[in-house]
Image: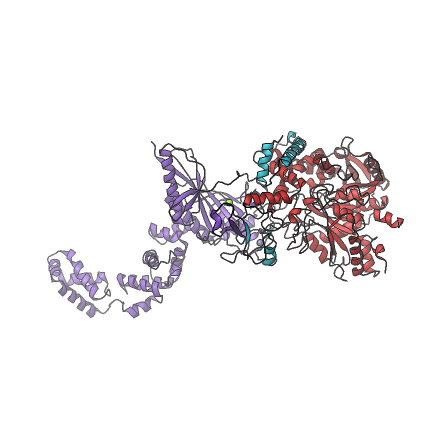
Amino acid sequence: MTALEPVIGLEIHVQLATETKMFCGCRLSFGDEPNSHICPVCLGHPGVLPNVNEQAIVYALMIGEALGCEIAERSTFHRKNYFYPDLPKGYQISQYDHPIAVDGRLGDVRVHRAHLEEDAAKLSHKGASGRIHGSGASVVDFNRGGTPLVEIVSEPDIRSAAQAREWAQLLRATLASLGVSDCNMEEGSLRVDGNVSLRPAGSDELGTKTELKNMNSFRFLERGIEAEIERQRELIESGQEVEQETLHFHPDDGSLTPMRSKEYAHDYRYFPEPDLVPVVPTAEMREAARAALPELPAARKERYLTELDLPEATAASLAFQPELGGFFEDALAANSDATPRAIANWVTGDLVAALREQDLGEDPYRSKAEPREIAALAAMVEGKQVSHSAGKQILAKLAAEGGTAAGVVESEGLAQISDDSEIDAMIDAAIESEPEAADQVRSGNEKAIGRIVGAAMKNSQGRIDGGLAREKILERLG
Amino acid sequence: MPASEEICRLSATELIAGIEAGSFSPAESIEAWAGAMESDDLNAFLWKGVEGGAEQGSGHLSGLPVAIKDIFCTSGIPTTAGSRILEGYKPPYSATAVERLTEAGAGLLGKTNMDEFAMGSSNENSAYGGVSNPWDRTRVPGGSSGGSAAAVAGGLAPCALGTDTGGSIRQPAALCGIVGLKPTYGAISRFGMIAFASSLDQCGPLTRTVADAALLLEVMQGQDQRDSTSVGLEAPIELPSSTDLDGVRFGVPAELVGGDVGIEVGVREVFEQTLSRIEELGGEVAEVTLPHAAHGISAYYVLAPAEASSNLARYDGVRYGLRVEADDLVSMYERTRSEGFGPEVKRRIMLGTYALSSGYYDAYYAQAQKVRTRIAEDFTAAFQGVDFVVTPTSPTVAFPLGARTQDPLSMYLSDFCTVPMSLAGIPAISIPAGLAAPPEGGPELPVGFQIAAPAFGEQDLLEAAHALEMSIGFQRLDQREGEGA
Amino acid sequence: MIDREQVRHVARLARLSLSEDEEARITEQLSGILEHVEKISALDLNGVEPTTHVIELTNRFRPDVPVEAPPREVLLEAAPEGDGDSAGFEVPSPQA
Ligand SMILES: [Mg+2]
Ligand SMILES: [Zn+2]
């Protein structure tokens, strides 16, 4: 049997970080008292009309430009009709055959389209009797209803769960750099659905695809897609058919269950929204969107590689993890004497490790360490004012307690010993404490020198530079 | 101080002139009209109450009460759109058109009866009972703005607001012998006007005179931030003063007026007399062709129900209005909507849902939108040769209550002459042109004459209508009764 | 033109429950109306642009500035079950 190849596409709903909703003047909110941001328009009262938020258009254009899309000359809104309590008008206003942006690319995945629409309200089930047929009640909170969304649809260019996660991370970094969204997966401001199918490797045909929902972190996204690939593989290999359906991912046990099929078949009866007029982005609007673009993650990585000479993996994690990259940029801006590479290593290495240890996730700004002090630390180590191992101690202290690098050096007495006589005395003591190793070095076995250097470092509590110690020992024993 | 009856015999412009001259106060005017409204025995009003308008100097319409079709949201005042599903609903806000009137000092004089969600041509589709035509109480006032037309014709209100989607201002104005103006689509904001068919709905005045229509249009027109499809007019509307039609060209479209389209003999006679009168006033009458106009009804009865089916999806028992309880969600939806909507509304929701449903969209909806393009082009071409297009407003005079309720298609054909202008978005006015006996015999009834102009041609339209109105000298019902009294 | 089965399907889409009688009547009436309406399908309108708005407008936007809404209690009271201070709009659970 030929090997099976996964074909994966992603659909991402991004809540825009505008002040107000897509079609009315209610403020956006998260976590506020239910139904505290509502008005006749977003409740779908009789006679109201939608009114397009200009900032949402600006953000959508920025997203289109950042994803290398073609901006539509004329884009329109449609009504997508269906009944559900979270949909107050009985239809969702969404872009259908003329989305605002099409045919883009981000990294190695093509972007099919990006379109504007409004978010639904939030429905929560009330009481414990929900299991008993006919006795359950739900409550609708319309605060979220009408939040502007941009839906981004990728082409099915992704071939593995890991690649899906990486691409979603790149997309998130890109959107975050634009400042158009909070991009918070747990709070739902970034929602990623996956379309997964399998086909014989090398084939052009597409297999039956399933749609995965509720993967509200990058880890779950990867796990969910991985699980679905395996599920489909087993079905196909045992001669069964994959059914086209929507699956719900359960983070607790990693399982996938079919969403209850709606009682009635869907027929959305799309038609042009008569209450809204076309959006025709002018040259000025497009120009403004392009001008508002910051350096995008892909370009930033390129710059880190070529201009700052950072290693590939370091450049990628700084460029694609917005908080980490921001912290790094802030440290760079402190103008210390450290090289970018040294700062980058401290940030992506020890600082990230410290975050993990303190259970602070991936945001270095949540630690107590100031970017400027990490830069100062890197400069001290590079300038041999402190040893590398002392540097590690300083970082741990900065991350846990804050303060300045110089202050920690001072209070912990970690400064490099610079007085030659003091160093010499320590070297002599180290040679004395390791007579065997000293003999071996004298007889030409240089490898044995490590033990003596180690002793010197230990005695000085890391306050001697390792290289210097080595030189001096060789001088004595050479 | 004149007696209430005298105040209630004045047109809106006369009323305002009387207040300006100090003959009576705004409060006296409002009081007189409140009394008139209370005497309603036509079932023209769904809510009787007066709000504002009595204050001196609160605007140039101070003292003028306006009856409001119950399709306009009025803050804190019941608004039902003639439907059970909105019984008891009090909107939390007011329509822009109503706000503009009250900002100009006008008062609100009750909410008038109407066909449910403006779907109908006889007012018999109101969930709150039909309205009688004041000329003959056994007959319909027309629809859907039947309550507004009957109130003005019956002397219960000096003027009223209506809405026109396919003829709902012009046709009842014609059947009740008053003036009804449908402005250019977008001239007046639709915000707060309960939607029937969004791409066609337009607010307009029903009045005693053409000048009154101009007066109200000027106050209400204008772009509104809250209605993206509103544009307003290019220049302020002035009160019309023309008395002749020198050099003005009127086009008669064979497709709407020809011998085979079901125009009653009496209606045709009045129409032809009016054409002769145009010529007497110095105007020219020519034939024009609107090759697709006869398909207007077909296109309209696809587009309007399709939009309506979507616009009426919000009445689901969740956030306001009627709810019929049920154990499960779908049953709650279905029971609420089935008990809340009347037969005509259900029929149109069904028709519109079908026309939009998978597999039928292209044949119905898309095709109807193309017919609409053609009809608009037809008018543009016709206006190359003439200034106005004229037709009888309604093919018939007011018909007996119940005559068409069992045959929806025959009811739909009442809009044959008014629908093409709605599809083209152009302004059109109906003025009373004379009386004609109904084919089945009985007292003579009003006949309306429709004049349509190019988009945004309201001022010219009002001037022509005014000249014709002056020459016709139609005696309104209130004037006849006033004489009799 | 349109049969009972289609009428039933459309009623379901529109969330209307029709009695047997209504179903029969509507099937007959819709068929009559559709027969009339269908005359337009005979027109050759290939290449004609469909019209959504007769008056051409573009780019009508609102500034991204909060607008004050009517009091929350008023909006909540309007709900069939509303008493103005309940936290939300209650419905039978879609899952029931
Ligand atoms: Mg979507
Ligand atoms: Zn709102």
The vertical placement of B413 against B50, above or below, is above
Q: Give the chain coloured cyan.
A: C
Instruction: Look at the image and tell me whether residue B252 can be seen.
Output: yes
Q: Nearer the viewer, residue A138 or A341?
A: A138
Would you say A196 lies left or right of A378 here?
Answer: right
* Quarter of the render that holds ligand 2: bottom right
Instruction: Look at the image and tell me whether residue A379 can be seen.
Output: no
Would you say B33 lies left or right of A177 here?
Answer: right
Q: Nearer the viewer, residue C23 or B59?
A: C23
Q: Nearer the viewer, residue A89 or B23?
A: A89
Counting from the top left corner in percent of width and height, residue B304 is at 66, 40
Q: Nearer the viewer, residue A431 or B305?
A: B305
The vertical placement of A340 against A409, above or below, is above
Q: Give the chain coloured purple.
A: A
Counting from the top left corner in percent of width and height, residue B14 is at 82, 54
Colour scheme in use? by chain
Would you say C36 lies left or right of A137 here?
Answer: right
Residue B290 appears in which quarter of the rendering? Answer: top right
Counting from the top left corner in percent of width and height, residue B116 is at 68, 44
Residue A337 appears in which quarter of the rendering? Answer: bottom left
Q: Which quarter shows the N terminus of chain B?
A: bottom right
Q: Give the chain coloured red.
A: B
The vertical placement of A58 against A436, above or below, is above
Residue at 86% x, 40% y is B280
